[in-house]
Image (spheres, grey):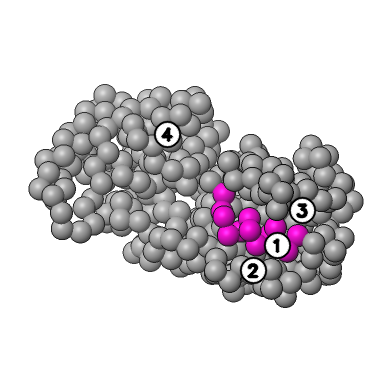
Amino acid sequence: MTAASVVLAGGGTAGHISPMLAIASAIERLDPSAHQSMIGTAAGLETRLVPAAGYELDLIEKVPFPRRPNRAILSFPSQFAQASREAQEILRRRGADVVVGVGGYVCPPVYRAAKKLGIPVVVHEANARPGLANRIGARQATFVGTAFPETPLKGAVHVGMPMPLHVSQLERDQMRVQARQELGLETDRTTLVVTGGSSGAQNLNAAVASALEDLLSTGAQVLHLTGQDKEVRDDTGALLAASGYHQREYLDGMHLAYAAADLIVSRAGAATVCEVAAVGLPAAFVPLPIGNGEQELNARGLVDAGGALLVKDEHFTRSWIGRNLLPLLEDPRLLETMQQQSAARGITDADERMARAALEAASR
């Protein structure tokens, strides 16, 4: 029996690339003989992240779907056809037995190429509101997995979010002291982590700065990940400083923050929502105020289950923090209840579920 050839497609943002790499890693564990490669575009983070993870990357042209009538509509058909031909050539060269798509501009031409070549397609959709690429791919897919149970894709199976093992298998209780030591935090102090993501979040930063004295008065310490080049400064222009307040621009390895935290304030990207549930971490989600509202949808199930709070960006203020976060930091029993509700929604084996679906499709 020949080894399976799996071609994974996705890219643009880490939200697509991270689950793609997690699925590939799980395929490697389940079937070390499988040949794997990935397809992306030159415009996405995959050009850096995929080779760094040890996988070969083929590139096709990025062809965005025109969202409104404009001049791009005229050139789109020919560009899409060319990208599909490029994808067909790659799939033939790689001897693909299955295509695994996770979304992004690269996927529609690859889905079309797979259909023309009779190659089965397996799709994973990360968001509660599915993207256009995967709405297209799901129509022909032999298996569709979703990160959230509410995702409206016909015939989809709720599998959870594929994530790295160091997150999905994180034992927070066992790692807490070590993580706090590595982050320069006190090991026996209630810990609040605030992050706006890799690019930071101006309103989150400003609100936390305004409420810092209140937060520290609870006896908690604060690890504030402000985002690159978004340091928080005081009225004199110096970096904001206080006993128990730890400011960093970013953290390479969010599993350390998850292990150190008793409570996290963050945006509600699909990966973040699923990761905090997987590790059983209470959260307060502040969805990005831009986009089509998908971040609020991502968070809604965990919030309704009692594992997290939800607040609009414009309402995340010192006053809201005082009413909602201070009581949690002051009462461990409240956090314990949230932790239990969060963990009850967490799924830690989505990577292997998707990997099995891909290998089964490849064997047909």
Q: Is residue 205 magenta?
A: yes
Q: Nearer the viewer, mark 2 or mark 3?
A: 2
Would residue 36 be seen by someone viewing this image from the given angle?
Answer: no
Q: Which residue is mark 2?
A: 317
In the image, what residue type sits under mark 1? Ser
Mark 2 and mark 3 in contact? Answer it, CB < 8 Å. no
N-terminal of the two: label 4 or label 1?
Answer: 4
* Residue 339: % across, % down: 73, 63
* Quarter of the rendering containing residue 208: bottom right
For the residues labelled 2 and 4, the Cα–Cα distance comes to: 36 Å
Q: Residues within 10 Å of mark 2 (few under 14, many from 20)?
A: some
Cα–Cα gap, marks 3 and 4: 33 Å
Tell me the element at label 2: loop
Q: Earlier in the sequence, mark 1 or mark 2?
A: 1
Measuring 51% from the left and 55% from the top, which residue is drawn there?
A: 270
Question: Magenta stretch containing residue 332, yes or no?
Answer: no
Quadrant into which the N terminus falls = top left
Please report whichever mark, 2 or 3, sits nearer to the chain's N-terminal start.
3
Q: Is residue 240 left or right of residue 105?
A: right
Residue denoted by label 4: 46
Q: Give the x, y percent position of residue 80.
A: 18, 42
Which of discs 3 and 1 lies nearer the camera? The answer is 1
Circle 3 sits on which residue? Answer: 222
Mark-to-mark CA distance, 4 and 1: 38 Å
Which of labels 2 and 4 is toward the front? Answer: 2
Under circle 1, the secondary element is: helix
Instruction: Decide if residue 112 is on the left or right side of residue 144.
Output: left
What range of the chain is rendered magenta? Answer: 200-212
Closer to viewer: mark 4 or mark 1: 1
